[in-house]
Every structure is written in C-alpha cells, then in structure tokens.
Amino acid sequence: MKNDENTALEIKSVGKVFDIVEYLGENGTSSVTSIADALEMAKSTVHAYLSSLETRGYVVREKKKYRLSLQFLSLGDYARRHHGLYMSAKSEIDELAATTGERVQLMVQEGTIGVYIYQTQGNKAVQTDSHVGTTVALHATAVGKAYLAFLPDDQVKKILDRTELSAVTDKTITDRSALLDELRVVREQGYATNMEERIAGMRAVGAPIRDSDGDAIAAISLSAPTTRLQGEQLEKVIPEKILQTARVIELRTTYS
C-alpha cells in the first residue's frame, strides 16, 4: 500500500514539474509568486521544483525570475531528427518554399492534434503565430484534413470521437457530417484546402504523405494570404506543386 502511495506522489510531482515548464513556455520569464498563483501551488513547492530544474539546466534564473533554458531546443531537435520523416522531407519542403515564396510546413499527428515538426518560409511568406512545435486542430487546417482524409475509417472515427470540433474562425467546419463530406472530396481530388478556417485572411493547400499501403503518416501544406492564393493558384498551380512534393517525400521515406 505504501509503495502505491509513493508512486502516486511521484506521478503527481512529475505532473507539477510539467505544469511549471508549460507555464513558462506559454508566459515567458516569470516569478515564483506569479507561477504559484497561476497554478495554485505553494510558493515553497514552486521554488523547490524551479531549483531542481535550474540545477539540471532546464531553467535559467535572472534576478528573481525564471525562464526556460535553451536546453529545450536541443531536446526538441533531437526528437525531430529521430523522426525519420523529417530527414526525408526537409530538402523538398525547402525547395517548395523557395520556388513559391510562401510558407510550407510538415505535420505529424499526436493523439487528436497535429504538430508541426518542420516549417520554412519563402521570401514572400507572411509571419503568423505558427512555428515548429505548434499544435493545430486537424479539422481546421488543410494539413490536418489532408491527413485525416487518407486514414482508415476506423482511425478517423476514433480521432473525431475524441475531438471537439471547435470554431477557430467563423469559417471553421464544426459539423461532423460536413467535415466527413469534405474529407470524401479531399480523397477524390488528392489534396485539401483551408479557406480561412484557422486564420482570417490566410488560405492553405495540404497533401498527405502516405505509406506503401496508401495510409497517411503525415501531411504537408503551403499557406499564403487570400490575395495570392486564389483563382488558378488555389485551384491548380499550388495543388499540383504540393502533390508533386508529397510524392517525392513518399519515395524518399519508402526507400531511404
């Protein structure tokens, strides 16, 4: 019984450490008091965890405040480089961004969300809130819909059963039946679009990266302002480019 209690306390402690790390990630440099108040923890407890994180080099103390250290960059890069897809896709994504001048991103699924593991920008790209490590709603992005459309039906059902189809903008698809209808269209044409469903004024075209069985293992997308991604660019030029890029990445992934 005592061992079970000790294990429960250790698990709770790990959770508190990650609460602090995530708070610093979201809020930047913060004091012990502000962290304790926000997380409803005792200041002494927060200070103890921060001291341990500082000793291990994961936070830096500046006067009376703390911030995450750059050591997290090393961990993130390690995780990304050991995801085989990143190494296969990077050069192709760089080339697509360079030739179009726009922003291109590579996404993989974790649970019910998508995570950008690589992103690069061409010389015309518009900076938004997204970056490497950004998590996105699958139903509200071209990259997410392209991914969902090429999963087996049972996997799509499991994901959607656990997903709240929240509105990110007033153009986000929030009805499950409407989303499934769109996914069928995506499967037929091979690519997905995002018509200002995540960010007003921005559109995107996404395509899946598939395995030898035809199932999605990731997806890529190109994002641009509505003023540039319209007409033939939206309906033909960019879809053809992104599908070509996706196919090359698939070949590299399969035979690397």
Image (spheres, grey):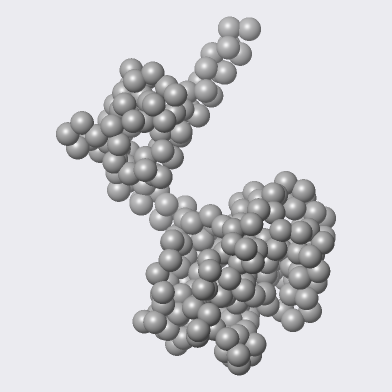
Q: Give the number of marks.
A: 0
Q: Quadrant of residue 30?
A: top left
Q: Quadrant of the N terminus?
A: top right
In the image, is 256 to the left or to the right of 50? right
Visible residue check, residue 196? yes
Q: Is residue 90 above or below residue 44?
A: below
Horizontal placement of 37 versus 243: left or right? Answer: left
Estimate the x, y position of residue 173 in percent, counting from the top left. Answer: 70, 63
Q: Does 232 sit above or below residue 114? A: below
Q: Relative to residue 58, is residue 73 depicted above or below? A: below
List x then y, in percent, for residue 164. Answer: 69, 49
Q: In this view, does 180 lie to the left or right of 54?
A: right
Image location (x, y in percent) of residue 83? 53, 58
Residue drawn 19% across the image and 37% down it: 62
Find the residue positioned furthest to the top. 2
Residue 89: % across, % down:
52, 72
- Tell me where residue 22 sits by quadrant: top left
- Which one is in front, 29 or 167? 167
Q: Residue at x 42, y 52 (%)?
A: 76
Q: Residue furthest front?
A: 170
> Residue at point 32% right, 38% down?
58
Which residue lies at the image location 68% right of the left edge and 66% below the top edge? 145
